[in-house]
Amino acid sequence: MSTITPPRPSPGTEQPGRAAAPDRPGSLALRALLALAVVAVTVFWWTGTPSGTGTTPGGAVTALGELTGLVASVLVCAQVLLTGRVPWFERSVGLDRLVSWHRTLGTSVVLLVLTHVLLMVLGGALLSRNALWSQAVTIVTTQPEMLSAVAGTVLFVLVGATSARLLRASLSYEAWFVVHLSVYLGIYLTFGHQIAAGAHFVGDPAARLVWILLYAGTAAALLTWRVVLPLADVARHAPRVTAVVPEAGGMTSVWVSGSGLGDLGATAGQFFLVRFLVRGHLVSAHPYSVSAARTGDHLRFTIGALGDHSRAVARLRPGTRVLLEGPFGRFTAARARRRGVLLIAGGAGVGPVRALAEELRLRGHDVVVVHRARSAADLGLGGELAAEGIDYRPVVGRRSELGHDPLDAGHLVALVPDLERRDVFVCGPPGMVATVVRSARAAGVPRSAVHHEELSLS
């Protein structure tokens, strides 16, 4: 296998990453935009509902059913846009938080859709004095586009159920991803019913046009940033695997090179959604962090053997074409506001930490790296960190063997006595990250100086 010695620019030539923008104003703006959309659709419902509708129980229940349906429809568009790779959203909030909001909205949408169905059936039954089951059959058989709407609703429920923690844990990422894709079919199947049977759209061409533009705009954004632009980048940069290097701890470093990859502006600590265009990797993209700083037209991803997909990475061959989306993320050197910085890595989290350590050192920061591992054999990339002249402090051993957690507040302060005067970056398994966050806060590190980022997109 070939090796790569990437170019190393001199200190001071680094460019700020896209994640440097503060996330709080963007987060508030996006929340306000979402709230405004819900308010707007509520006003639309209120003004379009006849004044006498609420005078009977059946009319009131039906009207509320129409409102829940409209709100669910708007939130579906918002949910799609949150993970549509829209640059302004990602730069303002960060992809990890967008995915978290996407999950939360997903639960809300499913509950609203089911509430909409229940209220429409109940309201119709009260108005017509039919039994609930009889009214449900009447709605399905008499209203336009209802059979497709029922099929779409079933898909929404299926996607929601497989995203629940219990079922999600029993599915492979690939299986979950394929099921998750069916939500787009569900949106398509329910849209016709909204336009053809929605009380606020029948007989109101202007309202129908606005609704169609809402969905068309959402689809256009999705196709642009998740399909067209990534494919254009593949054509322009032609990225390929150029080396596959085994690392300690069962990890694998994959070097990807392509014409002008440096123009993507990736900075240490950011990640790409990577799809290797070879059998076994085509179904889905996975988030992998850059593990080497400032490498020109080369990118290195160091990947832990955490599942079938990541283990198969070790069998990739040089020349394999790659589809890259990104860079994403705010886990960057630009977030450090203090001269002293503590980086804590565990597992595959050493990849972004290794890149960040080099970046921060070149920026003039006093860098300490704590590397948590079960054994010395698991200290992947540790040799590189030590060779860089960085203050590298491996912490080896299982908690059961050590008799304590070396990352709890007391032991972490003993290991890094000036902890409270440093920015703290942590990347590793969720349990380890949670422990470090608690320890840093207990040691007096302000919340704004503790940085971590979730890479899971499921």
Image: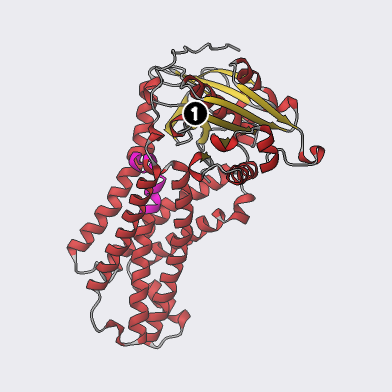
Residue 416 visible to the viewer: yes
Q: Residue at x 48, y 59 (%)?
A: 107
Q: Which residue is mark 1?
A: 339
Q: State the image coordinates of residue 291 (x, y, percent, origin top left).
A: 54, 25
**Up-down relation of residue 406 to residue 124 (above or below):** above
Left or right placement of residue 176 versus residue 67 in this view: right
Q: Which residues are magenta?
A: 78-91
Q: Residue at x 75, y 29 (%)?
A: 375
Magenta residue check for 382: no
What main secondary structure does the magenta stretch of the protein show?
A: helix
Q: State the image coordinates of residue 163 (x, y, percent, origin top left).
A: 54, 53
**Up-down relation of residue 211 to residue 398 (above or below):** below
- Count the marks: how many? 1
Q: Amino acid at mark 1?
A: Arg
Quadrant (top left, top right, bottom left, bottom right) of the N terminus: top right
**Up-down relation of residue 157 to residue 406 (above or below):** below
Which secondary structure lies at badge 1?
A: loop
Q: State the image coordinates of residue 445 (x, y, percent, origin top left).
A: 55, 42
**Up-down relation of residue 197 to residue 409 (above or below):** below
Question: In terms of depth relative to the viewer, which is nearer, 299 or 123?
Answer: 299
Left or right placement of residue 49 versus residue 254 in this view: left
**Location of residue 415 by image quarter:** top right
Q: Residue at x 64, y 32 (%)?
A: 416
Residue 84 visible to the viewer: no
Magenta residue check for 81: yes
